[in-house]
Image: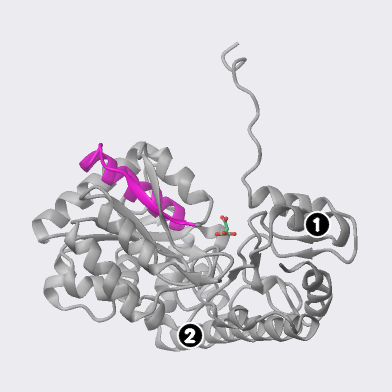
Amino acid sequence: MSFENLTAVSSDSILGLAQAFRRDPAPEKIDLTVGIYRDDDGQTPVMHAVAEAERALLAAQTTKSYLPPIGLPGYRTRIRQLVLGELDAGLADRTGVLQTTGGCGALRIGAELFAVAQPDKPVYLSDPTWGNHHGLMSGAGLGISTYPYFDLDGHTLTMDAMLDCLQRAPEQSLVVLQASCHNPTGADPDAEAWAAILDRIEQRAHLPFFDLAYQGLGAGLQQDALPVRMAAKRLGEFLVAVSCSKNFGLYRERAGALLMVAADAGQRRVLESRVKQIARGMYSMPPAHGALIVDRVLADTGLRNTWRRELAVMSQRLAVLRTGLARALAERRPDLDCSWIATGNGLFLQLGIDTGVVDRLRDKNHIYMVRDGRINVAGLNGHNLAVFADALAPRLP
Ligand code: LMR
């Protein structure tokens, strides 16, 4: 027997809960687990721009042959532009792009690349962060440290402690920074704070690895990429993991990209050759369908405008839900300041309740959220927001 020494491991902390939700027969159950955008009816619709692009692709397709290992050329160029904006020729020349299997694929391949280049250096993740960052980084063999990011009781960023930690981290560490819509807290640094973070990064020669999973779901397409564009103006090297899962609603199509800004064009070619080799050793070629859709939407002015409008509706809905939840909780708990709930960005917010309360909400009220108290704001809607506020308010600390 080859596998007799293996025992089962527990399900992923987020995906396992989504499964438990599906099994719960209670009709009043509320799903605030996995970070998926939902509309007011609880659906995750195919965006109109995406459906139209798909119809056109189907009509025009002539082959299912492989994509080049580095990915679809048009997709790579357009993603680079979406993230970095209009590039001058110099920056374009030193920015490599690998099409990846979603944002996770980009994070893992970026981590593998760093592990080859700097095998003894650690990676720093925010505390708290999205649980799977740990698996993706340790899977590449990197030693993991954390930097303080958020005070759960005060609901504020712990900027001084973060800067202090980055100052003391070994030089040339890899530092994963969520560019916007921080998962799980929804709290992002402002421009001044990002400038201070990039100062530390530069002083200590760290390599920033931006995780850009929600561009357009927070404060807008440009603003959500702010720290990446700031880095492009001042740093010689950095990485960006891009996901099209949320902003194009292409979750299952696994469209992502790893951007590698290198010191010069020669170094960019070296990095591209390396990540192609890493990807070849894992899965060979990226899947085509999602990237073809994104390419088509971004290349066509009409489709691009439709997409931007749809994305704006999604981000506005998230902002309205945050304000609605803050108001509903304040009405039920006038003794508490709930205004911070309205100030976050994107899909997530972390309520600052302990796991006992999370478990009771699940077992007694059939309300499912991640055990660290994170909710997917998009899981709220006109039908369940008041029910959720009624259940949560008396349990808020
Ligand atoms: C989440 O954080 O819920 C999403 O990013 C989905 C996932 O894969 O965990």
x, y percentage for residue 365? 86, 62
x, y percentage for residue 66? 38, 50
User: At x 34% / y 70%, what residue is drawn?
Assistant: 79
Which of the two residues, 256 or 338, is positioned nearer the viewer here? 338
Residue at the top extreme of this rendering: 1
x, y percentage for residue 23? 82, 50
Residue type indicated by callout 2 = Arg
Label 1 or label 2, whichever lies nearer to me, is 1
Q: Quadrant of residue 329?
A: bottom right
Magenta span includes 111: yes
User: At x 75% / y 53%, what residue is drawn?
Assistant: 356
The residue carrying mark 1 is 362
Residue type indicated by callout 1 = Arg
The label on residue 308 is 2
State which region is magenta. Answer: 101-127
- Label 1: how many Cα within 10 Å (few below 14, some 14–19, many 20+): many
| Image quarter where ligand 1 lies | bottom right
- Tell me the quadrant of the picture where the N terminus can be found: top right
